[in-house]
Amino acid sequence: MTPEEFRARAHQLVDWMADYLAAPGERPIVPPVLPGDIARHLPPEAPERGEDFDAIFQDFERLIVPGMTQWNHPGWFAYFPANNSPPSILGEMLTATLGAQCMSWLTSPAATELEQVTMRWLGGLLGLPEGFTGVIQDTASTATLVALLSARERATSHRAGEVGLQAAGGPPLAVYASAEAHSSVPKGVKLAGFGLEMLRSIEVDRDFALRPAALEERIRRDLGAGIRPTCVVATVGTTSSTAVDPLEPIGRICREHGIWLHVDAAYAGAAAILPERRWIFEGIGHADSLVFNPHKWLLTNFDCSAFFVRDLPTLLRTFSAAPEYLRTPHDAVVANYRDWGIQLGRRFRALKLWFVLRSYGAEGLRAMLRRHIALAAEFRASLEARAGFEVLAPSPFGLVCFRHRPAGLSGEALDGHNRALLERVNADGSVYLTHTSLGGAYALRLAVGQWRTEPADVERALRLIFSAARSLHAEAP
């Protein structure tokens, strides 16, 4: 394309994008397709000759868009939010246009320094104490793996990275996490070489938060068996129920035994920009690392995961790789983010986050979070006021976990009833919920977090839930 051809096509796409954003609720949330439906309409081989842009864009509209799940639909209440926003989209467009590889200061000086400044802004908004340094990772799963690898290296005086865990000698290394911890924790434990047998699943209390007494008991048992406690992963906002592990007592235990404390706040960490929710980080000063995702609840396009670390020398020694062809004259005085994580090549993720923080300001972001939390509280209150419904966990953020419990149903029959209820609600196409298991009970999850979700969308979900419950009851033998 010539620059003028590009200009015309870009305007065409921006017009489509604006139309798409203007009508977020018009498409079904989950596309009515079956496995293979999209692929069978695509050629089996790449074209030999270039095709006309109009044909490509027509296929995008005809084949791709109808097969996409609408994560930014106002009726999206599934999983956790994966937000975007107009300023973030525009920032992402500029990132793509610049096409920069941001692995070191020299390869993109402004990208590095903007990331440093933006992460300081975020740390200030969260109220993090002095000593944390921030870097953007792609996802919280990667950040947790980075923390586990750093903990492993500190525990072995970097011998594991040099000669391997087995050759490094010393006692076996153990990792501890709540039974409600995210699946990225066992995955990271495998990838970091600890082995799943060395992951300790710690029991939770009635609110599904890690029990510090159980953690301390397991640590002491491992010490008595000649095992070295290496890392604790505490969760602020668990995936199933948004339970908050108590950081202050967990942190004291970690400090007593010299254990790396990593805090996974992927979803709920954004709430700490609210003064009234700052309690979730009480004890964060004990942590060695923390992750939360602006791409979940802070209006920033995926992917953008904020990782903060206190022991920067350990992080750098764990991940630094400096062959001659990567060395620059400024290495001693600048941040080269290629040495702050797993990736060598890096995207300019800070730009879209900078656009968001400047466009909405802390005030605008706080207003959105408060609105979502209030909508979730209203939804919960409506359930609690309705006979036959029970809420299964606390709701400190935007998630409510619940089930319908008609008289006389229990066990698998009760679980099956709620599975059918969920299917019936989602079949409408205007809202979408997901499920989990809490204390062995099948639970439905409604997560308020999309930036365009309004009270009417939550009310629609309630109507569908109540209607499905009535119809299932009427159909019961």
Image (tube, helix red, strand yellow):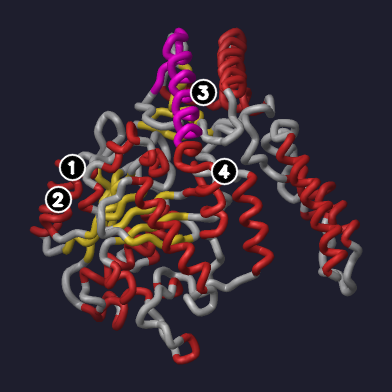
- Work out how far the residue at label 1 is from the one at label 2, CA to CA, in angstroms: 8 Å
Residue type indicated by callout 1: Pro
The answer to which image quadrant residue 130 occupies is bottom left
Q: Which residue was labeled with disc 3?
A: 418
Q: Which residue was labeled with disc 4?
A: 83
Residue drawn where x is 44% and y is 71% of the image: 337
Of mark 4 and mark 3, the one earlier in the sequence is 4
**Label 1, residues with CA under 10 Å away: few <14, some 14-19, many ≥20:** many
Of mark 2 and mark 4, the one earlier in the sequence is 4
Please tell me which residue lies in front, 468 or 233: 233
Element under disc 3:
helix
Tags 1 and 3 in contact by the CB under 8 Å rule? no
- In the image, which disc is placed on residue 253? 2
x and y, in percent, of residue 191 in the image? 39, 65
Residue drawn where x is 36% and y is 27% of the image: 393
Tags 4 and 3 in contact by the CB under 8 Å rule? no
User: Is residue 86 visible in the rendered structure shown here?
Assistant: yes
Q: Which residue was labeled with disc 1?
A: 212
In this rendering, which labeled residue sits more in front, label 4 or label 3?
A: 4
Q: Is residue 366 above or below residue 343?
A: above
x and y, in percent, of residue 294 in the image? 48, 48
Residue type indicated by callout 3: Asn
| Outermost residue, bottom side | 324
Q: Which residues are magenta?
A: 366-391
Of mark 1 and mark 4, the one earlier in the sequence is 4
Identify the image quadrant of the N terminus.
bottom right
In this rendering, which labeled residue sits more in front, label 1 or label 4?
A: 4
Tags 1 and 2 in contact by the CB under 8 Å rule? yes
In this rendering, which labeled residue sits more in front, label 3 or label 2?
A: 2
